[in-house]
Image: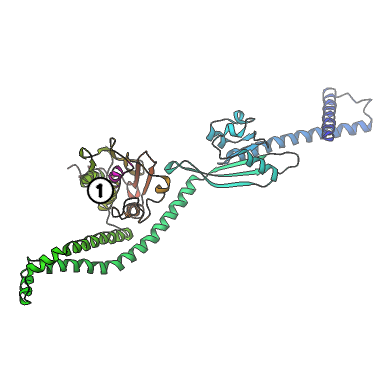
């Protein structure tokens, strides 16, 4: 350390001497220290060269510093330089944007005070600086649902025997993580769609036989068909006696159970085929009317049993009348709306909701420059993050056995994403209700069509 100080002192003295001599030569051209002997003349020229080289070096250092600062501040990622104790030495523009602190305000303060939301512990900094091994964490999650953000965090120890510290790089990778999750979900849905089609076709034929035979058994034991009475008489049996025996042994109830189970299985097969089906016939559709019709159809599902009798939740419509028609499959979009309205109603009936407390279902219609946006929300019990990550998966349901197939939302996802190139997403928190948001492209090729142009108001 002493050697470094001595060297620095000698350097300063040397530079000062050179500068002094330079000033003398410049200010007093006749000054030649004893009429300028050859050795002094040589020293004079060397001095000129050293001063010139020093000026060039300083200019290069300034340009290099400006270039490095420009590169660092042009980075979209956050870059922070810190001492081994966690005090900030450098703070780029991205760090300024995220925290609202300027470089002047942040420099010299501790990283935990300047950037409290950064997922970083002091022990991590200590270990990274001590070991000289970079530290890295990927896809650090902050928040939940649609508001969640993801960050890649890396700490690089400074590689220098004289200077200790570290460089922190924090990169917002939320768009990439969301895209990766969407691709995974799409691949999963495509694979399940192919599987669903195969399963549905394999089940369909034996299921049709079960339902048909159950119906035939009912018909051939009915007292209302003359043919049954005639054949029974030929065999010496009274058809009414046979019917009485069947009723006594509850055979009709068993047959009815077979039919109900078969109908339920047929519904599952229908949903499976719907899940795997391809393109549809798209036509220009007035979404305002479609929402109104869907609410009429779903109204029966809104009944809530209370100690005071049947209660209906308040249905709030927030419709932008300026939203024009879009090209879509009206029956499919209505199917999606009915699924979402049914889910909202069932959430209000959930035992987790408790007694009805001003139950509400809200449906809204609006538009952006590129999309039409439909939202269906409720003020029910909401969902945990774990449930929220699975709700669009086929056969996933939180309902009691026999109260759902687990295909409604997955079919809705497939209809919106694959058949309409749109987006469907959900937001929910326990105790804070659930909101489903659908985004559909307004028009193919960016064309705009008004309701009047299609004669909707004629």
Q: Secondary structure at mark 1?
A: strand
* Left or right of 395, for residue 70: right
Determine if the magenta segment contains residue 349: yes
Q: Identify the main secondary structure in magenta.
A: helix
Residue at coordinates 23% horizontally, 60% vertically from top-left? 263
* Left or right of 244, for residue 8: right
The 10 Å Cα crowd at callout 1, few under 14, some 14 to 19, many 20 or more, is: some
Q: Quadrant of residue 76?
A: top right
Return the x and y of residue 385 as percentages of the image width and height. 42, 45
Return the x and y of residue 359 as percentages of the image width and height. 28, 37
Quadrant assignment for the C terminus: top left
Residue at coordinates 25% horizontally, 48% vertically from top-left? 285
Front residue of 414 and 249 = 249
Determine if the magenta segment contains residue 292: no
* Left or right of 161, for residue 268: left
Front residue of 164 and 443 = 164
Q: Which residue is mark 1?
A: 285
Front residue of 101 and 385 = 385
Return the x and y of residue 68 as percentages of the image width and height. 65, 39
Query: With respect to residue 25, does 417 lie above or below?
Result: below
Residue at coordinates 29% horizontally, 42% vertically from top-left? 348
Quadrant assignment for the N terminus: top right
* Left or right of 88, for residue 364: left
Residues in magenta, as a range: 343-353
């Amino acid at each position: 350390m002493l050697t470094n100080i001595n060297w620095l002192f000698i350097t300063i003295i040397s530079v000062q001497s050179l500068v002094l001599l330079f000033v003398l030569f410049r200010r007093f051209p006749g000054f030649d220290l004893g009429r300028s002997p050859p050795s002094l003349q040589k020293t004079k020229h060397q001095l000129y060269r050293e001063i010139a080289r020093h000026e060039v070096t300083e200019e290069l250092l300034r340009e290099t510093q400006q270039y490095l600062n420009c590169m660092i501040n042009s980075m979209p990622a956050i870059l922070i330089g810190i001492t081994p104790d966690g005090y900030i030495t450098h703070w780029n523009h991205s760090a300024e944007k995220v925290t609202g602190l300027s470089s002047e305000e942040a420099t010299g303060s501790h990283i935990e005070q300047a950037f409290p939301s950064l997922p970083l512990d002091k022990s991590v900094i200590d270990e990274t600086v001590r070991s000289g091994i970079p530290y890295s964490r990927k896809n650090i999650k902050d928040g939940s649902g649609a508001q969640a953000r993801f960050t890649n965090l890396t700490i690089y120890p400074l590689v220098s025997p004289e200077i200790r510290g570290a460089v922190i790089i924090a990169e917002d990778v939320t768009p990439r993580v969301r895209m990766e999750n969407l691709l995974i979900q799409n691949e999963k849905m495509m694979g399940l769609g192919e599987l669903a089609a195969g399963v549905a076709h394999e089940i369909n034929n034996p299921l049709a036989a079960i339902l048909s035979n159950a119906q035939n058994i009912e018909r051939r034991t009915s007292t209302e068909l003359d043919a049954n009475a005639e054949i029974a008489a030929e065999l010496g049996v009274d058809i009414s006696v046979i019917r009485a025996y069947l009723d006594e042994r509850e055979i009709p109830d068993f047959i009815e159970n077979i039919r109900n189970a078969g109908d339920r299985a047929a519904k599952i097969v229908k949903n499976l085929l719907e899940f795997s089906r391809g393109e549809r016939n798209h036509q220009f559709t007035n979404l305002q009317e479609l929402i109104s019709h869907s609410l009429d159809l779903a109204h029966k599902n809104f009944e809530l049993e209370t100690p005071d009798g049947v209660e209906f939740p308040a249905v709030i419509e927030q419709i932008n009348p300026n939203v024009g028609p879009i090209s879509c499959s009206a029956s499919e979009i209505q199917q999606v709306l009915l699924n979402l309205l049914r889910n909202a109603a069932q959430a209000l009936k959930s035992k987790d909701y408790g007694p009805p407390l001003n139950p509400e279902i809200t449906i809204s219609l609006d538009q952006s420059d590129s999309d039409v946006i439909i939202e269906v929300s409720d003020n029910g019990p909401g969902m945990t993050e774990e449930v929220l990550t699975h709700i669009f998966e086929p056969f996933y349901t939180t309902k009691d056995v026999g109260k759902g197939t687990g295909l409604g939302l997955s079919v809705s996802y497939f209809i919106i994403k694959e058949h309409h190139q749109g987006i469907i997403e959900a937001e929910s928190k326990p105790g804070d209700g659930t909101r489903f948001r659908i985004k559909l492209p307004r028009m193919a090729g960016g064309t705009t069509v008004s309701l009047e142009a299609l004669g909707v108001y004629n």
